[in-house]
Amino acid sequence: LNESSAALVKHLEHPNGWRRDAAQQLIVLKKELSVVPALTSMALTSKSVVARFHALWSLEGLGALKVNLVQKLMQDLNPRVRIQAIRASETLYKAGEKSLETAYASLLNDPDANVVIQTMMTAKFLKLPNMESGIKAAMEKNNAGGVKLIGSQIIEPPKSRNMGPFGGGVLNKEQQASLDRGLMIYSELCSQCHGNNGQGTPAGNGKLIAPALAGSARIQSHPEYAVRVVLHGMEGAIDGKTYAGGMMTSMKEHSDEWVADVISYIRNGLSNDASLVTPQQVAGIRAKTADQKGMYPYDKLIKTVPHELQPQEGWKITASHTTSTRIGGNVSPQSAFTYEGWTTGGRQSKGMWYQIEFPKEVNLTELQFVAPASIKKGWQRNPKAPQTPPPMVQSYPRAYTVETSPDGTTWKESLAQLKGKEGENVVSLGNVKTKFVRLKLNEDLAQDSDEVPWSMRQLKVFGQN
């Protein structure tokens, strides 16, 4: 720590990485520009390539990096040095050194694929003029798979999942707008007690003002719990634990959309991963609980809302068709409850079914599942073509019925003519007492329908006491 900056420069060639890192940090912190000539010489001529890197970035950290040095290093025989020079040059370009554009254009034709990839990423980061045409030209000239993959992803970025519920499809504009409004509501109102990150705001003496929402099993379970709390409020201990805030006040004066927005954000942000909530769901729960007087005590509320029934020993889960969703994966209908998922494998056809038998009768209220997209059957990547995303088909059930039975022999249509959709599917059953539940396809798909299978994952079953 007490060594001069000149002495620290010598440590940049030390074989110990910790010493080199510490020396670079101290050189930058001391801000002594007297070492700039020594650092420049080391960056150009040192026999240690890592010392050259340290010298280069020390100059960048001191604000003493010059264009002529960077341009020389961009032509160095060592491709690793060229890559570091490209990265370091970004600071100069952002400061106004537009003359570097010529060097970037030349480096897109570099013989080393890694140098080309770094140049493409720098071009994207700096938003260089003619970036797209330059990258396309590089992809045509360079046969390296990495160049084609990175280039195609820069020109046509993969679609963002937009924080969709448990890996569901891309959110539409209305859904994304709902989450944006919910974030604003949460930030302005809820974060004061629940914390900006949903971990709860400390109140001192080891207590929180309000319970954590991040990673909460209650929040991620059936949405009726959260909707009832927001509409009517809640007071008292939660699972035996008290909070400094004491209670959650009723907010039923707000619109159904307002309630749906903030709950959807809480269930999809803050490290949570659950279904979105619609204004229609809120309206239904509002009507059902119109006679509620005052706030809910937690112990009473938790007994009245639907709760998730976890698969357990004694459940018999079967299907008419089952195929693994991946190479080496499980071939089991029970995989529908996991992220791996279940699929029929073949084209959807009338009469295909998926069934759960419970050990005893349950009061069934709702089913939730995700219908994921899958790679088109028979597709193979062309190693010589640009690395673009594979073609996908939507494997949601096109038309199906939910049937229930007390004995597995006598079946009743609880819901008929249902239409599935990409991503999250919610099937509300009201409150049906049953020992068996079965989803059954109603129609065949056309022969030219890309062999679309029926697939489900993250299946959730909800019941009520």
Image (cartoon, rainbow, N blue to C red):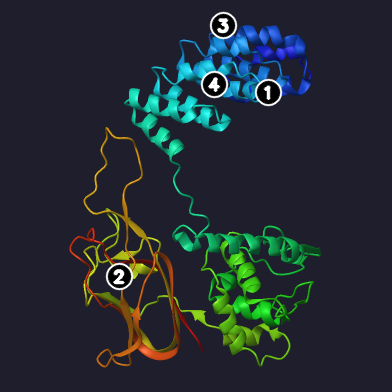
> CA–CA distance between discs 3 and 2?
64 Å
92 to the left or right of 174: right
User: Mark 1 highlights which residue?
Assistant: 95
User: Mark 4 highlights which residue?
Assistant: 86
- Residue 363 in the image, given as x and y percentages of width and height: 45, 89
State which mark lies toward you, 4 or 3.
4
143 to the left or right of 300: left
208 to the left or right of 289: right
Question: Tag 1: residue type?
Answer: Ala
Q: Could you say which quadrant of the image residue 384 lies in?
A: top left
Q: Which label is found at residue 45?
A: 3
Question: Tag 4: residue type?
Answer: Ile
Closest to the observer: 326 or 157? 157
Are dots 4 and 3 in contact, CB under 8 Å? Answer: no
- Residue 231 in the image, given as x and y percentages of width and height: 67, 80
10 Å crowding of disc 1: few (<14), some (14-19), many (20+): few
